[in-house]
Image (spheres, rainbow, N blue to C red):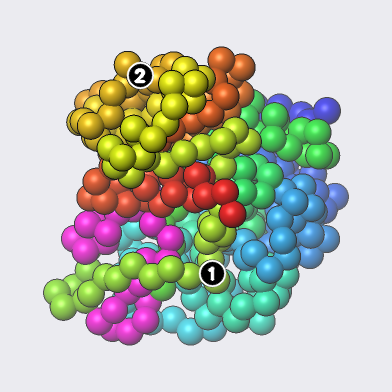
Amino acid sequence: MALLLDPEYPEQLDRVSKIFRSSNPVALPTETVYGLAAPLLDERAVAKVFALKGRPKFHPLIVHVLNWEMAKPLIAVQDDLALRLVKYFWPGPLSILFKKSELVSDLVTGGSDSVVLRCPEHSVFRNVLSRWDAPLVAPSANRFTGISPTDCLSVLKELGAFGLEAVVDGGESARGLESTIVRVDSEKKISVLRPGAVSIEQLKEKLPEGVKVFKEASKEVPGSHARHYSPAKRMLLLSNEKDFKALSKSDLSEMALIRVLAKDAKWLSGDSFRAEFVLSERNSDLEAASALFRILRKLDESRVYKSIAVCETSDQGLGAAINDRLRRAANQS
């Protein structure tokens, strides 16, 4: 049975380092979702991350660092625009794709010559990084393509039966949505490879005039699988009123509806479903993002509903990342 560690007790955080030294991963809280952490330079421990998650070896991992000084030895090429992003968004939920140095193994990057780096802001994860004094890989602490966990009990349900040794209880994840991943293409162009907890609008606010931000579908970063963040139950993405009207009364009687914002999809009749859940009654994309995976997991575990229906929200702000997760979660391929 996996240990549940309390970060308020230093001796329990000492246990994390002991587990790392035995080449085993530990689940840690971050401000986005819980991560399955292991020492970057210990390939045996990294291999166990893949095994615990049931993750294909070609799917890369995000590397977490305490600060820029810890990041520099992992990077082959640095540029001014990337440093500007580091200055404004680290610590925080922005991950940046860099050309990797020889210190980073191909196992971590899925054979790519690039590595994704992030500097988390969660105090518990930063405490662990400071104690370990070396980078950690940390993909989300769930089985591959499953719903990302935002609390320690969800981690235990996901990975406890697969040999997880310990999880550190850091409470509910504040943001509840994975980091945004970007690549600096030139002094005038940045590509968003995975939308996440930093919106495109927030990126543009901190970039020099003339720098363009583009969205790009990429298979070289985590979270790019067509089906991801997915419940075990059947999940339908309703794009318009026609999709809604095509549902039978039998379907509706056993289906839960998730509406992202209270103002979304007024053509949907919530009364027709078994139940309706609104991620944010106040129409806050931040509140909706923090609730998304928690509500998805709640409905997936419930015996009341046989299926889940969702509808997209506006792509403004964090809506783009929320919609990305909904599309992948509902993809049955």
User: Which residue is found at the position 50% from the left and 44% from the top?
Assistant: 330
The disc labelled 1 sits on which kind of residue? Lys
Left or right for 114, reference 97: right
Image position, residue 133 (x, y; %): 63, 56
Q: Nearer the viewer, mark 2 or mark 1?
A: 2
Q: Nearer the viewer, residue 331 or 254?
A: 254
In the displayed structure, would residue 177 be above or below residue 254? below
- Tell me where residue 86 sits by quadrant: bottom left
* Residue ID for mark 2: 272
Task: Please state the extent of the stretch shown in magenta in the rendering.
Answer: 184-205
Quadrant position of the C terminus in the picture: bottom right
Residue 271: x and y in percent read: 32, 16
Quadrant holding the N terminus: top right
Q: Is residue 143 visible?
A: yes
- Indicate whether residue 252 is drawn in magenta: no
Decide whether residue 186 is among the magenta residues: yes
- Say whether residue 48 is left or right of residue 279: right
Could you say which is closer to the camera, residue 288 or residue 68? 288
Q: Secondary structure at mark 1?
A: loop
**Relative to 281, 273 lies left or right:** right
Q: In the structure shown, which secondary structural element does the residue marked by tag 2 occupy?
A: helix
Residue at image position (35%, 19%) is 272
Which label sits on residue 219? 1
Pointers 2 and 1 in contact (CB under 8 A)?
no
| 92 versus 250 height, above or below | below
Q: Is residue 192 above or below residue 268?
A: below
Residue type indicated by callout 2: Ser
